Image: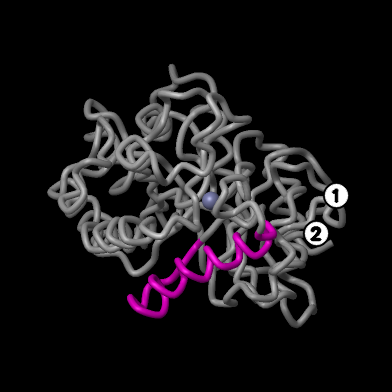
Amino acid sequence: MKNRSDVNWDVHGLCIGVPKRADYGAFKQLISDVLPYYGCNTLVLLIRYRYAFQRHPEVTDPGALTPRQAAEIAELCRANDIRLIPKMNLLGHQSGTDRGSELGLLRAYPEFDETPDLETVRYCRSLCPSHPAVTDVVFDLMDEILMAFDADALHVGLDEVFEIGHCPRCKDTPNAVLFADWVRALHRHLAVDRNAEMWMWGDRLLDAETMGYGEWESSANHTWERIDEIPRDIVMCDWHYEEGETFPSVPYFAEQGFPVVACPWRYVAHTQQFLDDAASYAAGKDSASNKVLGVLQTSWCDAGALARYLLGDDSIEGVARLVGESFRVAMEYGR
Ligand SMILES: [Zn+2]
């Protein structure tokens, strides 16, 4: 088996959320001190609706970054040769399970809810991709985020979509068509009209049955079936957090023609299994293996705690500590 030193990856990234106000200083120090030290050159910043949108202030959630902070983060990343890719969730992940937990967009525009008739949903609410006005607002938000962070790419989320094909507008259309049409609509706006790169999570384009992953890391609700219609310049963020020996989705996406980034999470042992396998494929002779761009460490924990742990605060426990340990290991791959 090839090892991690046999490939040279372009992308060494960290995906992290917006910090609480009190942690903003630590967050800036993470960018200026920690990321360059570990050779981390890509920061995917999960905004959701935590930005003080000017054109649509009604969707802004509490704890939002101001335009001035966005510009400051962008400048700090630029000064440290870090590519800043803001991230939104532009299909699923619009709420918790219960009514009243809606995030900014559905709180302000309940008519965009795919499941307005359901009091509780299995995991989280989705946008209705067929609502005639949804893109009017979504495209405005995308434009404003790109501009605020002076970004040349946007991560649009699209993971773990379970609520799809439910509303009267959508229910007679196959999920695969709904999903592919929505991806193409976002791509047209972002890549074609704005010349920005589109990144997304890959799980809805993986067939759970043939991939052998569960219904979270891959799709058991048919969303993958029109993968042929998905533009091949979208960067697929292929996330896997469980243990495993082989991760067939990395070669699958590469051979399908997508640039692909391997995205581990919290357990170092799982991160190593995943990245060993991805690096082994990337170092091989397969003609598509150069489609593997690198690694994006995910965090899914408090951004301030992770920043403080990586800045040397050894009292930090829990997921932030685990993610910090995984990050150090992940950044060693592909060099
Ligand atoms: Zn719908």
What segment carries the magenta color? Answer: 173-199
Give x and y (percent) for residue 11. 51, 63
Point out which mark residue 212 bears. 1
Amino acid type at image mark 1: Gly
The reply, left or right, for residue 200 in relation to residue 67 is right
Q: Main secondary structure of the magenta part?
A: helix
Position of the N terminus by quadrant: bottom right
Q: Residue at x 24, y 37 (%)?
A: 64
Q: Would you say the residues marked 2 and 1 are in contact, meaning their CB atoms lie under 8 Å apart?
A: yes
For marks 2 and 1, the one nearer the N-term is 1
Check the image and report above or below for 79 versus 121.
Answer: below
Give x and y (percent) for residue 241. 68, 40
The local secondary structure at tag 2 comes to: loop
Determine if residue 42 is in view.
yes
Residue extending furthest bottom? Answer: 287
Query: Mark 2 or 1, which is nearer the eye?
Result: 1
Q: Residue at x 41, y 23 (%)?
A: 100
The reply, left or right, for residue 224 in relation to residue 303 is right
Give x and y (percent) for residue 317. 50, 19
Q: Residues within 10 Å of mark 2 (few under 14, many from 20)?
A: some
Q: Residues within 10 Å of mark 1 (few under 14, many from 20)?
A: some
Amino acid type at image mark 2: Pro
